[in-house]
Image (tube, rainbow, N blue to C red):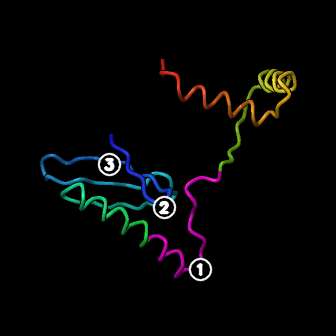
Amino acid sequence: MTIMHHEGYEARIDVDEEAGIFHGEIINLRDVVTFEGSSVDELKRAFAESVEDYLAFCAERGEEPEKPYSGQFVVRADPILHRELASTAKREGISLNKLVTKILQRALREPAD
């Protein structure tokens, strides 16, 4: 799987070898936005045009376009884990949010099992 980026939007790219075409779908939106191209340059142009079309569509409807990510999400954890994380954060003199962010960043850098 290949990932492309354009103005904060991210798309997953798949190849249809039989048809000789690339298919893309923006993956960080609730709306379904797709595009395709027969070359990398064509695919990049189609991706950019799809983002611009999406933004124009939202403007026509008077809606705010969905931003790729706000930086906030809710995590549900076992109460014991929650207590341990909160205690660790206090011992380190940082917020629970900062501790969880550090742990997540570290987990992304380590190879998955």
Q: Is 36 located above or below residue 104 in the figure? A: below
Q: Which residues are magenta?
A: 54-70
Q: Secondary structure at mark 3?
A: strand
Residue 13 — which label? Answer: 3
Q: Which residue is mark 1?
A: 62
Residue at 47% in and 77% down: 56
The tag earlier along the polypeptide, 1 or 3, is 3
Question: Which residue is at the far bottom?
Answer: 60
Residue at 87% in and 26% down: 90
Q: Secondary structure at mark 2?
A: loop
> Label 2: how many residues lie within 10 Å, few (<14), some (14-19) or many (20+)?
few
Name the kind of residue labelled 1 in the image.
Gly
Quarter of the image for residue 100 reads: top right
Task: Give the image location of residue 89, x and y in percent.
Answer: 82, 26
Name the kind of residue labelled 3 in the image.
Ile
Q: Tell me if label 3 and label 2 are in contact, CB under 8 Å.
A: no
Q: Tell me if label 2 and label 1 are in contact, CB under 8 Å.
A: no
In front of the other: 14 or 92:
92
- Mark 3–mark 2 Cα distance, whole angstroms, equals 17 Å
Residue 63 counted in the magenta span: yes
Q: Is 83 located above or below residue 32 in the figure? A: above
Quarter of the image for residue 94 reads: top right
Q: Secondary structure at mark 1?
A: loop
Q: Is residue 88 left or right of residue 49?
A: right
Name the kind of residue labelled 2 in the image.
Asp
> Label 3: how many residues lie within 10 Å, few (<14), some (14-19) or many (20+)?
some
Q: Which residue is mark 2?
A: 31
